Image (tube, rainbow, N blue to C red):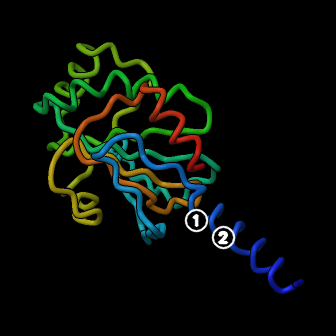
Amino acid sequence: MKLINYLIIFSVLVINVAFSKEKPPFKNILLLDKPKVYKEIIFQDRDGNQLDLNQINANEIYILNFWATWCAPCKDEMPSLDKLQAKEGIFVYPINMEEKNLNNTDKFYEDLNIKNLNTYFDEGLKLVKVFGLRGVPTTIILNKNKEMIARISGSIDFEDEKFISWLNSIR
């Protein structure tokens, strides 16, 4: 009888753990079964300084958004990404995949009234290769350990309450 009780309790616990991860709210979000570790996540800030995300010590969700000034879906989602940056515990790195041109990037931000986001670049498309990107916009979501836990192919509304709720559930 004790064995049966233990088995029932064990089964309930396993089922709860297995289904505790909330499903992504949009079809274009791929949630990984197991977080993926990257040895280096290096890109440049607007001044040309190299940043290695693995050297930043903060317990946050990290969002790497790959975009281009000529990309219409990037233009559509950037304002909501800008507002997402203002949320506590989330840091957004919008990484322009084009050859570095601060005038074009600054105009893009100005035209869209972007206030909270900094400018980053992927010189030589090194991160594009690391993450195996196939188009823009593409967003990589990393947990507090800087492990990739999800990928978004295409644009979404980063202000959507379903997305915010899901993002909070994976922290």
Q: Percent position (x, y) of residue 4?
A: 80, 82
- The answer to whether marks 2 and 1 mark residues whose Cβ atoms lie closer than 8 Å is yes
| Disc 1 residue crowd, few under 14, some 14–19, many 20+, Cα 10 Å | few
Residue at x 66%, y 70% (from the top left corner)? 14
Q: What amino acid type is highlighted by mark number 1?
A: Ala
Q: Percent position (x, y) of residue 3?
A: 83, 86
Task: Determine whether, in the image, residue 144 is placed left or right of residue 29.
Answer: right
Residue at x 28%, y 46% (from the top left corner)? 28
| Disc 2 residue crowd, few under 14, some 14–19, many 20+, Cα 10 Å | few
Q: What amino acid type is highlighted by mark number 2?
A: Val
Residue 99 or residue 113, whichever sits in front: 113
Q: Which mark is residue 52?
A: none
Dot 1: element: helix
Residue 128 or residue 140, whichever sits in front: 140
Q: Percent position (x, y) of residue 13?
A: 71, 67
State whether residue 145 is above or below residue 24.
below
Task: Determine whether, in the image, residue 47 is placed left or right of residue 169.
Answer: left
Q: Which residue has dot 2 on it? A: 14
Residue at x 87%, y 84% (from the top left corner)? 1
Asked where in the image residue 90 lies, by quadrant, the reply is top right
Q: Which residue has dot 1 on it? A: 18
Residue 85 or residue 14, whichever sits in front: 14
Task: Determine whether, in the image, residue 81 is placed left or right of residue 125.
Answer: right
Residue 67 or residue 104, whichever sits in front: 67
